[in-house]
Image (spheres, rainbow, N blue to C red):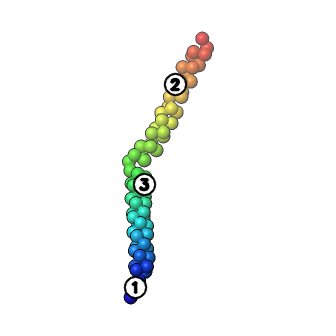
Amino acid sequence: MHSLNDTIEKMTTLEELKKEIDEIKSRNKRVEADKAWETSGTTFVNAIVPTIGFFLSTLTIPWFKSWWLRNYEK
């Protein structure tokens, strides 16, 4: 027969295992959320906005240069 101490020791081990499983499940939820963020459209917007800004700035540089030169000569 098992002693009371053996039963208590097994219960503690089971409680520890349950706690570890709960921690793993919690971590998995965070990882899934991170993956969802990485593949979402929001990530695309974060990448495309600076690119569009740079593109537009290169289109306007000649205009600003000619404006500056006209004002510089005055």
Q: Nearer the viewer, mark 2 or mark 3?
A: 3
Against 71, residue 28 (above or below) is below
Callout 1: SS: loop
Q: Nearer the viewer, residue 67 or 17?
A: 17
The crowding category of the residue bearing disc 1, from other C-alpha atoms within 10 Å (few below 14, some 14 to 19, many at least 20), is few
Q: 10 Å neighbourhood of mark 2: few (<14), some, or many (≥20)? A: few
**Amino acid on which disc 1 is placed:** His
| Residue where numbered disc 2 is placed | 63
Residue at which label 1 appears: 2
Q: Which of the 4 image quarters holds residue 5?
A: bottom left
> Where residue 41 appears, x then y in whole percent?
38, 48
Image position, residue 10 (x, y; %): 42, 77
* Residue drawn at x 43%, y 67% as measured from the top left: 20
Residue 29: x and y in percent read 39, 59
Amino acid type for the residue under numbered disc 3? Asp
The residue positioned 54% from the left and 28% from the top of the image is 61
